[in-house]
Image (cartoon, rainbow, N blue to C red):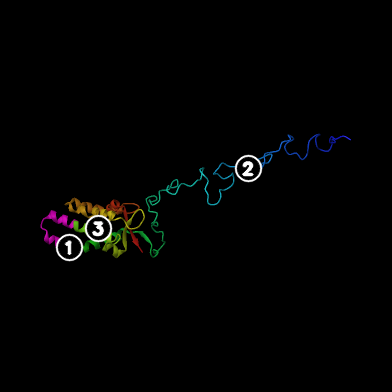
Amino acid sequence: MSTNDPSGYGYPSGQNPYDRSGGQGQQPPYGQSPRQSPYGQQAPYGQAPYGQQAPYGQQPQGGYGTPPPFDQPAYGQPPFGQPQGGWPHWLPPTGSYGGAPIPGSRQLAPIGERLLARLIDVAVLLIPNVVLFLAVKNSFLLSVATALLAFGYEAVMLITQSGQTLGKKALRLRAVDLGHGGKAAESGYLARAAVYSLPGAVYCIGSLFALLNVLWPLWDKPLQQALHDKAAKTIVVKES
């Protein structure tokens, strides 16, 4: 009896039907299939395999879509704490409340209320200015004295009252830091008071500067800052 496989049974002579090595008589390496797809290969260290996600809590190392470090902004976004498109991140856009402001919220202070608060502060200093006018006969010394009086009042009130004067208190306004929306540094409030009041010591030019400073928020967009706000990096908000 012949030991060869009979012909006609669908298998060529000498071929084992259970040999999946392609007739070469070799076995694939351990753990791999004979015909392994390139997608089944192991990904480089630190990267997820093709079509799979990285383990929970881990991020792929490099490659498209990898988030930037915490201390660096994402592409097209400003660094943390800086205004986005000229608008502070901590201040809601104008008109976002859709009606009456929410209690405890803040919004950009209306220019009319800022002017009214400034008039209240001028009225507070009216009597001390009259006393100086009667006591000081020299016009130059009078200008210096009134400028120093305005500077002292503005600086002391802003620092001790967290950005408020008596006029701002009456209208619930506050001068805050532009970067984070909180109380500005003392140096910032001193700069704000100095730019607002000390130019008044210069005859005639000081008056023109004061007028320009008061009118500057009318065309300054979008934060409506006066020149003393720009010097101190502050804005004025209204608290509901």
Q: Earlier in the sequence, mark 1 or mark 3?
A: 1
**If the image is split into quadrants, where does the C terminus sit?**
bottom left
Q: Is residue 139 magenta?
A: yes
The amino acid type found where label 3 is placed reads Ala
* Rendered residue at 31%/61% (across/down): 173
Q: Which of the two marks, 1 or 3, is nearer to us in this view?
A: 3
The foreground one among 133 and 148 is: 148
The local secondary structure at tag 3 comes to helix
Main secondary structure along the magenta-highlighted residues: helix
**Callout 1 touching callout 3 (CB < 8 Å):** no
Residue 46, image x and y in percent?
54, 44
**If the image is split into quadrants, where does the N terminus sit?**
top right
**The quadrant where residue 131 appears:** bottom left
| Separation of residues labelled 3 and 2 (CA atoms) | 71 Å
Q: Is residue 79 magenta?
A: no
Specify few, some or many for label 2: CA neighbours under 10 Å numbering under 14, 14-19, or 20 or more. Answer: few
* Rendered residue at 30%/51% (across/down): 230
| Separation of residues labelled 2 and 1 (CA atoms) | 86 Å
| 172 lies left or right of 35 | left
* Rendered residue at 17%/57% (across/down): 146
Q: Which of the two marks, 2 or 1, is nearer to us in this view?
A: 2
Residue at numbered disc 1: 128
Magenta-drawn segment: 128-147
Q: Which of the two marks, 3 or 2, is nearer to us in this view?
A: 2
Residue at numbered disc 3: 155
Residue 218, image x and y in percent?
30, 54
Specify few, some or many for label 3: CA neighbours under 10 Å numbering under 14, 14-19, or 20 or more. Answer: many
Residue 40 is tagged as 2
| Separation of residues labelled 1 and 3 (CA atoms) | 16 Å
